[in-house]
Amino acid sequence: MQVPFSGPPTYDTVAQRFSSYPNPLAFFARKRQEEARDRGEFVDIHDIGGVDPKDFDVLITDIDDEKLRSEIAEVMGIQYLAKATEADANTVVEIGRGYIFGRNIRTIFPCVVSHDGKAHWVFFIVASGVPLTYLSVQVSAPTYRKNGWPLT
């Protein structure tokens, strides 16, 4: 198994290490599993139960739908839930651009979400301590309606 990139202690080394193959997180997890197996310990490759979304309920009181459609949309230069082009929907984002918003220091990240051939711009509020990502009711409900998104 190939070892992850290593070099002098610099930001460039850290960036290159985490973008290299294999990813150091996967490499060292696999290494620990192999060592445990060699010691005769039981290694379970199955995640029993997974993450319970109820354990990560986040209350965001400083940003609502109106603020996403006004202040944040103005800074982004993109209307919230605006239609996205097919090219944007098919783009693989390697480095995203966003900004820090408000007194609660919320990271806002614009991204295209597509479903059933429809693509729209959504502003994600990044909560780094939460292992799952959710779409708001304003975004997710129209995704599953037969008539499509609420905005044209």
Image: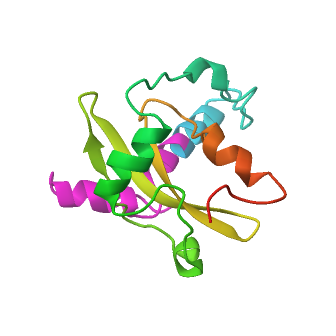
- Quadrant (top left, top right, bottom left, bottom right) of the C terminus: bottom right
Name the side, left or right, on which 122 lies relative to 96: right
Q: Position of residue 14 (x, y in %)?
A: 26, 54
Residue placed at 57% from the left, 68% from the top? Answer: 83
Name the side, left or right, on which 116 lies relative to 54: right
Q: Position of residue 4 (x, y in %)?
A: 39, 58
Name the side, left or right, on which 118 lies relative to 91: right
Residue placed at 62% from the left, 59% from the top? Answer: 151
Q: Position of residue 100 (x, y in %)?
A: 26, 43
Of the pair 19 and 84, the residue shown nearer to us = 84
* 38 in relation to 98, above or below: above
Residue placed at 81% from the left, 52% from the top? Answer: 145
Residue 23 highlighted magenta (yes or no): yes
Can you tell which quarter of the image residue 20 is in?
bottom left
Q: Position of residue 11 (x, y in %)?
A: 18, 54
The extreme top residue here reads 55
The extreme bottom residue here reads 87
Q: How is the image coloured?
A: rainbow
Range shown magenta? 1-29
Q: Is residue 7 visible?
A: no
Residue 83 highlighted magenta (yes or no): no
How many numbered marks are there? Answer: 0
Of the pair 1 and 61, the residue shown nearer to us = 61
Residue placed at 44% from the left, 26% from the top? Answer: 60
The extreme right residue here reads 146
Can you tell which quarter of the image residue 105 is in?
top left
Of the pair 10 and 140, the residue shown nearer to us = 140
Q: Is residue 64 visible?
A: yes
* 39 in relation to 84, above or below: above
* 25 in relation to 47, above or below: below
